[in-house]
Image (cartoon, rainbow, N blue to C red):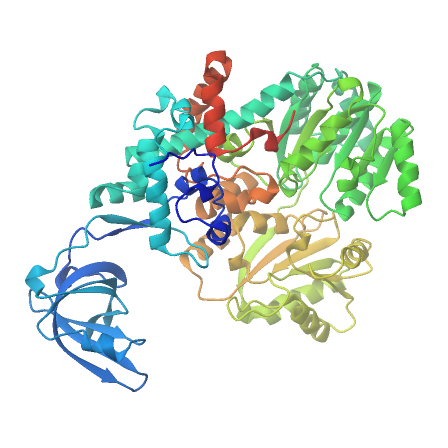
Amino acid sequence: MAEVRLDQPVAALRGVGAALAGKLAGLGIERVLDLLLHLPLRYEDRSRCQRVATLRHNESAQMALRVLETDTRNAPRRQLRVFCEDADGAPFLLRFFHFRNAQAQGFVAGAGIRVWGVARMGPGGWEMVHPEYRAFPDIAQVRPEGGVRPVYPLAAGLTQARLRGLVTDALSRAGGDPALGAGEVAALSPPTALDALRIVHQPPDADSAAALMAESHPARRRLIREELLAHQLSQRIVKRRMRSLDAPALDGIDDARDALEGQLGFAMTGAQRRVIGEIGADMARTRPMLRLLQGDVGSGKTVVAASAMLAAVRAGWQAAMMAPTELLAEQHARTLGDWLAPLGVSVVLLTGRLRKREREERRRAIAGHEVQIAVGTHAVFQDDTRFARLGLVIVDEQHRFGVRQRLALRDKGPDGLRPHQLVMTATPIPRTLAQTAYADLDLSVIDELPPGRTPVVTAAVANGRRDEVIERLRTAVAAGRQAYWVCTLIEDSEQLAAQAAEEAAGLLEAALPGVRIGLAHGRLSAADKQRVMREFKESQLQVLVATTVIEVGVDVPNASIMVIENAERLGLSQLHQLRGRVGRGHTESQCLLMYQPPLGESAGERLDVMRRTHSGFEIAEKDLALRGPGELLGRRQTGVVALKIADPVRDAEELPELADIAERLLDDSAERERVHALVARWVGDVQRYGHV
C-alpha cells in the first residue's frame, strides 16, 4: 500500500475525486493532515447492546430485540410500527415513516434484530424512529456491531461512513511521513502525534472514548499541548524576526508626555504614565516595538497614543494611526489635531471618502514630510501611500484588522528601518487568551479610569416594560440629552424573534412625536451610515436607532441613555462595548438591557454580570468562559490564530511551561527542523502571520 505524505492534497487518498475534494474543502480539509486534524465531535459506543431498563431519554443506544408483530397505519400519517421486546421481555417500539412494502415484510415475528438510534420515551413507552438495523434468525444470535465509532462534523453531501473510511485510509498510509517524526518534542511526553491521532480517531474501547471526551486521555492532552506549543512557536518566530530588524531610536517620550499634559489641562492617571513609560522604553531601542495596549472603554488610550506620536515627531519622524472606520478615523484626526496643533504638529486625515485630488495632495504632503501624523482607514496602508520617515505605527481596535493589515505598514519605513508598532484595543482580553492569540506582542494594560468618570447605571428590563423605557427617553431628550436604541437584527426573524431596527425606529417616531430620530444599520451604504452617525454626533439627531454597528463608534458625550433590545442574545464583551458609548459626559448615564423572558441560565448570568460590574477585564474573563475565544476575538478573518482542540481558559495552566519550551526550542539551532515541522502541522505557513 503506497504511503501518503501529510502535505499531499486529500485527493491522494483512495476514491477522492474532484467532487469529493470540493465537499471536503468546505470543511477546511485540503491536505491529508487537515483530514487527520478534523477531530470527532463525539463517539458512538457500539461495543455492547443495552437493555430497555438502562436507556436514557434522547440518547443513542444499540439494542438486541425480538420482533413480536408489525402493523401499518395511515393516520395521522403513514407509518410502519414494529413491536419488539428485549431479552428481559420489556416492550420497545420501532417507527418508520418512509418505508417500502418489502421492508415491512422483512420484519418476521420471532426473529432477532439489532438496532441503533436515539431512544426516547414516547406516548406509549420506549421507542426509536428510523433506526439503523440488521436482522438475525433469533435474539440469542444478535451480536453487537463492535467497537467505538467516531462522529465527525459534516458538510452537505458527506456521510459519517465516507469520512470514517477516508480517515482510516489516511491513518494506515501516513506512518512513514517524516514530518510526523520530525515534529516530535520530547518534553510533550508520549504518545507520539501519530499514535495520539490513531487513538482519537479509533479509540480502543468505551472507557477511552469517555476519557477523550473529558479531555483527560493522554492522547488528547498530547495533541492539546502540541497545538498550544505550535502556536507559541509561530508567534515567537514572527516576534524574533521582527526583533532582528532595525528601527529608529525615538527618545524623549517623558518630555512629550509633559508637553501634552500641559496642553490638555488635566493630569494623566498613574496607569497612563506607567504605560507611556513602557512604550517609551521600547521606542528608545533600535529594535521595532511590538506592543499591545489594552484599556477599557474611556481609560484614555488616545492620550497614551498621542504622547508616543508626539515623541516620534519631536525625534524627527512621522507617525501613522489606523482606525477601522472612517468616522472613528475622523474623530481621532480631530482630537489629535486639537491636542497637537498648538505644539506645532500637523495632523492629516486620509480616508477613501476624500476626493481623488484631495487624497493625492495629502499623500504628496506625507511623502514630502510636510505632514507629521497621518490618521486614516485602510487607505493609510495601501501601496501608493508613501512616508518620508515613518517611525511609529498605531493601530486602533486591533481585533477589527487582520494581522496582514496590521503588518503592512511596517514596510513603509525608510532605508530598511521598520517603524515601531503599537496596537490598541478597548476589548479587554484576558491574559490567558492574550498569551495565546498575541504571543508576538508585549502587553501593556491601562487598568485605571480617569477621575470624574460617572459609572453607567445598568438595569435589566423585560420587554413588557417598553413604555417605561420610552418614557425615560422622552425625559432625557426634553432635558437636552441624546440616546441610543440598539437592535440586534435589521429585519424580522422567526428564529430569533428580535425587534427589527426599522420597526423600532417607526415605533419610536410614533411614540415620540417631534423627536429627531435617525437609523443606522449594516444595509445602509457606508456613506449613508457615516452621514447618520455624523448627524448624531453633531446633535442634529436626538435618538439614534442602530444595530451593533455603533459598537466601536464615535464619542458623543451628550448621549446619556443606551437601550439594548434583546440583550440576552449578545455576548458580554459586546454588551460592554455598547454600554461604553454612554457615560462619556458629566451627567449620570443609563444602560437599559431589554430582554425577552423567560431568560435561560447563561443569558441571565450575562445580564447579572453587566449589572454587577463595570470592569472590562472581569467581563472579558466571564465572556471567555461562557463563549470561548473564537467569539471573543473573532474568527480567522480577524487575524486571530484559530485553535482546533486547545482552549486557552481550560488549558491556561499549560501555557507557562509551553512558553518556556518554545523559547528553548527556538534558541537551539539543532531544533530548527523540528520546530518548523510542528508549526507546519498545526498553524501552516507562519509567514501568513507576518512575512518578515
Determine whether 89 is above or below 643 in the image.
Answer: below
- Give me the residue at 79% from left, 40% from top: 379
Determine the residue positioned at 48% across, 49% down.
21
- Which quadrant is the N terminus positioned in? top left
- Residue 372 shows up from this direction: yes
Position above or below: 314 against 690 = above
Near-viewer residue (306 or 36): 36
Residue 590: name its quadrant. bottom right
Identify the image quadrant of the C terminus. Answer: top right
Q: Nearer the viewer, residue 558 or 365?
A: 365
Q: Position of residue 652 (x, y in %)?
A: 42, 32
- The foreground one among 618 and 680 is 680
Farthest residue, direction bottom: 75
In the rendered view, does 604 fall on the left or right side of 402?
left
Give the quarter of the image for residue 274: top right
Q: Quadrant of residue 339?
A: top right
Q: Whole-percent x and y of residue 666?
A: 50, 17
